[in-house]
Image (tube, rainbow, N blue to C red):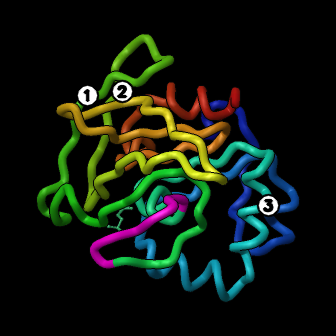
Amino acid sequence: MLSSLGAETVRVRTTDDLATVDRLILPGGESTTMLRFLKLYDLIPAIQEFAKTQPLWGICAGAILAAREVLTPSQESLNLINISAHRNFYGSQLESFTTPLTVLGLTNPISAQFIRAPLLNALPPSEHFSSAEVLARLDQQPVFFAQGKTWACSFHVELGDDSSLHELFLKL
Ligand code: GLN
């Protein structure tokens, strides 16, 4: 999706890789497994430092990793955005669905894919965190948050053919 928009992309696996990029997507997948690798390659402090100044977008499992609090089951996280994530709230793999979604800042609705997606909720502001802003809701429930240059969304968009959200991310 990013390549189709003309962006040069790098698969970030090490802190050296991270030093070569100006923005980062924590993709979907399995957050427990991803957390293991982040620890193994000592990427957690490096990503936390990176996200202080650079755009970071957590998608589904990536949003779980970026959240301040993770529940059902609880799990460590990178504490990058003031939200909680209840894992697998939107059902099993077989209950995956695609739905149109209106996103703040975009003219046309996007097509959002929910795959074992988490429930995301704002947490109250604290000493270190202001409130995260809601950029999209599904049936009243927030599904997309932004805090500074950090985004967290419970859905995927890279599986469809609409690149408008990626385009917005490249402009952050
Ligand atoms: N349920 C997965 C998790 O807990 C996330 C699924 C996804 O990224 N599509 O990490």
Q: Quadrant of the N terminus?
A: top right
Mark 2 residue type: Ile
Q: Which residue is mark 3?
A: 49
Q: Which mark is residue 14?
A: none
Picture quadrant where residue 162 is located? top left
Observer-side mark, 1 or 3, equals 3
Which is more toward the observer, 6 or 42? 42
Q: Residues within 10 Å of mark 3 (few under 14, many from 20)?
A: few
Q: CA distance from mark 3 to mark 2?
A: 31 Å
Q: Residue 169 at what x, y percent from top left?
A: 62, 34
Give the mark nearer the N terminus: 2 vs 1.
1
- Tell me, yes or no, whether the two marked residues, 2 and 1, touch with CB atoms within 8 Å: yes
Please tell me which residue is depicted at 62% across the width and 44% down the height of the picture.
150
Q: Residue 23 at what x, y percent from top left?
A: 73, 47
Give the mark nearer the N terminus: 1 vs 3.
3
Picture quadrant where residue 36 is located? bottom right
Q: Does residue 116 lie above or below 154 as drawn?
A: below
Mark 3 residue's CB less than 8 Å from ligand 1: no
Q: Which residue is mark 1?
A: 100
Q: Which residues are magenta?
A: 66-73
Q: Which mark is residue 110?
A: 2
Q: Residue 118 at what x, y percent from top left?
A: 31, 58
